[in-house]
Image (cartoon, rainbow, N blue to C red):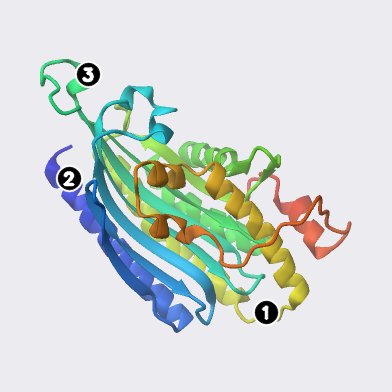
Amino acid sequence: MSAADGRVVRQYLLDLQTRIVSALERFDGDCFREDAWNRPAGGGGITRVIEDGRFFERGGVNFSHVTGAGMPASATAHRPELAGRRFEAMGVSLVLHPRNPYCPTVHMNVRFFIAMPADGADAGAGAGAVPIWWFGGGMDLTPYYPFDEDVRFFHRACRTAVLPYGGQTEYRRLKDWCDRYFFLKHRNEPRGVGGLFFDDLGADGKTSFDDGFGLVRNVGDTFLDAYLPIAERRRDLPYGERERDFQAYRRGRYVEFNLVFDRGTLFGLQSGGRTESILMSLPPVVKWRYDWRPEPGSAEARLYDEFLTPRDWAD
């Protein structure tokens, strides 16, 4: 991997952000606000956010490219060999919260990291002086009143994105990884119906730069085709206060996961990232209730009984 490779990844990410925002603006009918920012410790980004749109109650599509003198604790906790290294991180992360409860929330992220030797490291000091790079990313769906055909459609799009880079075996690995990752351990329940998740791709030397970047591009380029047809099918379904109330309750699970477990959120906050951009992923209207349970046989109970259990949706 060379410096030129890093520039190619950056340009792809900037283009991806622009393409996705343009498509979402056409779909919603309202415009995203653009907010370019600089990070005092190094780097910056472009945040693009929509609030109180015609379709999206809140949505954000963020690009960031930041540098730092040391990897934060959220990274070194599961990768201790990164301690003391300088880093460069770039990515596009998006979360979309539709107003209509029959339309699912969706998340997508693609990212590229480089962990460089610490300042003053001896170029001949062995493994510690060699840059370590890796790709990560994925996308996942969080419905409130799910439809079987929508969940299957999303998962099949995810499978299509992965098949050129490892086939069915790799798709199964990333699908299962997503099911494990987007899981609220303190609730003993999934956040949603899953999709894809991967991290550290290339760090062990088993994945080439071209294959890692190829998978990231496939995931990024597949997103609109995976999500917008679902939103189009459900955008005009009528709903009332009951559906909005349940949506707000389930959004609480989204908040809990992002603030307690999400690696991207923790990395951003611990590395001194821009708080407004990091927390744009949170929904604008949320509710918590004490020890609430859905009525057996209800539409709300169907989410728990039929969808919040990992399944082979793509088959």
Q: Residue at x 81, y 54 (%)?
A: 292
Query: Which amino acid does the dot numbered 2 rest on?
Result: Asp
If you read the primary sequence from the N terminus, does the residue marked by circle 1 or circle 3 appear first?
3
Q: Residue furthest top?
A: 125
Q: Position of residue 127 (x, y in %)?
A: 22, 18
From the viewer's perspective, is 67 left or right of 274?
Answer: left
Badge 2 element? helix
At x 63% / y 82%, what residue is drawn? 236
Residue 57 placement, left or right of 2: right
Task: Estimate the spatial distance between the alpha carbons at disc 2 and disc 3, rounded to whole Å.
Answer: 21 Å
Residue topped by disc 1: 237
Q: Is residue 86 above or below residue 247?
A: above
Q: Nearer the viewer, residue 41 or 55?
A: 41
Q: Considering only vertical position in the picture, is 132 above or below 213?
A: above
Q: Amino acid at mark 1?
A: Leu
- Tell me if residue 233 comes above or below residue 149 in the rendering: below
Question: How many residues crowd mark 2 within 10 Å: few (<14), some (14–19), many (20+)?
Answer: few
Query: Mark 2 = which residue?
Result: 5
On the rendered image, what quadrant is the N terminus found in?
A: top left
Q: Is residue 1 something one can see in this rendering?
A: yes
> Nearest the camera: 148 or 284?
284
Label 1 crowding class (10 Å Cα cut-off): few <14, some 14-19, many 20+?
A: few
State the mark number for residue 127.
Answer: 3
Amino acid type, callout 3: Ala
Find numbered disc 3 in the image and state the secondary structure of the residue it sits on. Answer: helix
Query: Could you tell me which residue is drawn at 25 percent across and 29 percent down?
Result: 85
Q: Position of residue 218 (x, y in %)?
A: 37, 53
